[in-house]
Amino acid sequence: MKIFYIFSFILLIALPAWSQERIPAVTEPATAKVLKFYPNPATTQITFTFNADVDRNLSFQIFNFIGKKVYEVQSVTPITNVNLNDFYRGIYIFQLRDKTGKIVDSGKFQKS
């Protein structure tokens, strides 16, 4: 019976490691972040700073974690402060979209 357990151990642990092929990861070109935000987690307000070369015709949206839009700005400014007093505690998702609706940048932050 001990031989069965030893043999099973070898098959389950050692054999898969030998059989895995090492395929190099495909890396996409690194893209610079369009915006930065701080502080995270935030309590009363959060500040978003946009790169200087960003098109000002972008819309900025914040969604709660269930997908409801809670904040929107149609044309961004270099620094945007969002008052979080009316936001509930939790995780929020932000999206920066161009005129066609394509997402340029996105991320998440926490309101505590």
Image (spheres, rainbow, N blue to C red):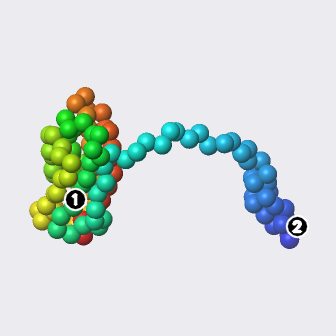
Q: Visible in this render: residue 63?
A: no
Disc 2 residue type (three-letter):
Ile
Disc 1 residue type (three-letter):
Thr
Classify mark 2: helix, strand or loop: helix
The numbered dot on residue 47 is: 1
Q: Of the residues under marks 1 and 2, which one precedes in the sequence?
A: 2
Looking at the picture, how far across and down is residue 48, in whole percent?
24, 54
Decide: few, some or many residues near mark 1? Use Cα within 10 Å; few <14, some 14-19, many ≥20. Answer: some
Instruction: Count the labels in the image.
Output: 2
Classify mark 1: helix, strand or loop: strand
Decide: few, some or many residues near mark 2? Use Cα within 10 Å; few <14, some 14-19, many ≥20. Answer: few
Task: Tell me the quadrant of the picture where the N terminus can be found.
Answer: bottom right
The residue sitting at 56% across, 41% down in the picture is 27
The residue where tag 2 is placed is: 3
Which residue is outermost to the front? 52
Q: Visible in this render: residue 5?
A: yes
Q: Which one is in front, 52 or 98?
A: 52
Task: Tell me the quadrant of the picture where the C terminus can be found.
Answer: bottom left
Mark 1 vs mark 2, CA separation in Å: 63 Å
